[in-house]
Image: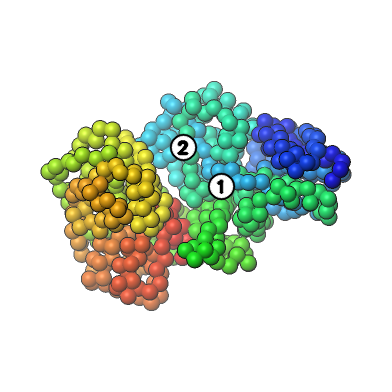
Amino acid sequence: MAKKIIIGSRGSELALWQAHFITKELEKTGTKVELKIIKTRGDKQQEERFSEMPGQGFFTKEIEDALLKKEIDLAVHSYKDLPTTTVEGLTVGAVSYREDPSELLLINKDAVDEKRKFSLKKNAILGTSATRRKVQIMAMRPDLTVKELRGNVPTRIKKLKDGLYDAIFVASAGVERLGLDISGFHSEKISPQEFVPAPAQGVLALQIREGDKNMQAVVGKINHPEVEEVVKIERKIFNLFRGGCNLPLGIYCEKHSDESDKPFFKAWAAFAPEEKAIPRYYHFHTYMPEGWAEKVAEKIKSEKPASVFITRDIKEDDFFSRVLKANKYKVSGRAFIEFKSIPISHMPFGDWLFFSSKHAVKYFFEQKRDIGNMKIGAIGKSTAAAIRTYGKRADFIGYSTDTRLTGKQFASLVKSANVVFPQAKDSMRTVQQQFVNKSQTRDVIVYETIQKPVEDTPDADIMLFTSPSNVEAFFEKKKISSNQKVIAMGDATSHTLKQFGVKSVYLVPSFDEVGLLQAIFSV
């Protein structure tokens, strides 16, 4: 294309970064570019709540109008701002790489409480304008007060610095792209699998006129097809709900390959039917993406409450119970094992401590042993959260439900360092077995498990087993019926269930509370 192309963009600092980034990418291909700034309705109405603004396209409509009128040749958008219902005559010709899609919680340092979820103090004031963020955070932290927060990323950060809020939500992608200094705050990056982002968060959309073959050829040179593939799934699921930007639905998708290099897809979702509802959480996977978005959307829409039994003692108002009960599920639970502390007779030297359960954390730290400068590893997010209640933070957190894989990753990280493993008397030692040099691992027995009676366990539609010991205790007196669905927390628990003849077992996608809920709502 010989002529100079004109890019249309909003004038915010982040929008200009995005436009300049695409300009540089296009210039690398020999394309000449000019930039035109266009003010949108979302820019003009800075104080109005999103939920009270009619229609869609708060940050895109005026730019799209300019594209249709041929005042510009290319529009650059944050893809998450672009309505999923395509404007007639326009199409997304290409997408950028994907910046980290995680949510970032920025907290004023006087509002930090590391013993609480996301390190935010009780009854804090949190700023966000996104309904999706509001329903998720209020489910996890109902003590918080959520206040409307508008403005571009630097403006929002300034409002936090000025003390108008204790904490605010921003997309990690915006902070990364602008290179903003957030060292004055405590920051908590929340994974997209736990706190589900907006569809296409972290991706730029390059919008052109439909049928413009010249521009399609130009932007096609900088397209990222692997990103395009997953965000199309995210946006398709969102579009099937016919909702606007205020729809409390988060969708995140990833593409993976199995051991035989066969591709498959994973998707996470958090959905609330209205702003004041507590969301449901989902996890899906497939080897066949064709028509998958429709199946995922239908599953989310057609939720049918069931009864759930979990093999642990539950509290009436904890996050797990509240989410299920709010969505009309019947929930009960009781551990089939109990624990007894074992005093540490000798504390071996080590560079690291590794905890493979919340119980190991409890029975180790209650003995008030001095760990000096030892680093800490945790099997998963739930165990890492337990460590935080004792004023410590995990330096390594495993994110796989395959304990062997976590063990291999941890062994690779620590190299030749010595590791102390506080554990149960009858521990399976799966993580230790992944070390080539077994002399690096030092076991410390801090508790033992004792079986409890199981005869009065209620029959539930869904049975969630949290450990191999609970499985063994259950099957000594009970059995699973053919119409019950069975969920296992981890590969070891799944393996034990199959040893007792349970053929169909659904694995939780992660070891935290959200992972348990994702399994229940998706099974």
- Asked if residue 227 lies left or right of residue 42, the reply is left
Q: Residue at x 25, y 52 (%)?
A: 438
Specify the amino acid type for callout 1.
Pro
Snapshot quadrant of residue 448: bottom left
Residue 137 is situated, as x and y percent measured from the top left of the image, at 49, 43
Closest to the observer: 224 or 78?
224
From where the camera sits, is residue 347 visible? yes
* Secondary structure beneath label 1: loop
Q: Report which residue position mark 2 lands on.
A: 188
The correct choice, above or below, for 150 with respect to 518 in the image is above
N-terminal label among 1 and 2:
2
Residue that extends furthest to the bottom in the rendered view of this protein: 482
Decide: few, some or many residues near mark 1? Use Cα within 10 Å; few <14, some 14-19, many ≥20: many
Decide: few, some or many residues near mark 2? Use Cα within 10 Å; few <14, some 14-19, many ≥20: some
Residue 202 is situated, as x and y percent measured from the top left of the image, at 61, 44
The correct choice, above or below, for 222 with respect to 521 in the image is above
Specify the amino acid type for callout 2.
Glu
Residue 200 is situated, as x and y percent measured from the top left of the image, at 62, 49
Q: Report which residue position mark 1 lands on.
A: 197
Residue 259 is situated, as x and y percent measured from the top left of the image, at 47, 63
The correct choice, above or below, for 462 with respect to 113 in the image is below
* Secondary structure beneath label 2: strand
Q: Residue at x 23, y 59 (%)?
A: 337
From where the camera sits, is residue 66 visible? no
Q: Residue at x 69, y 37 (%)?
A: 21
Closest to the observer: 378 or 458?
378
Q: Which mark is residue 466?
A: none
Q: Quadrant of the N terminus?
A: top right
Residue that extends furthest to the left in the rendered view of this protein: 345
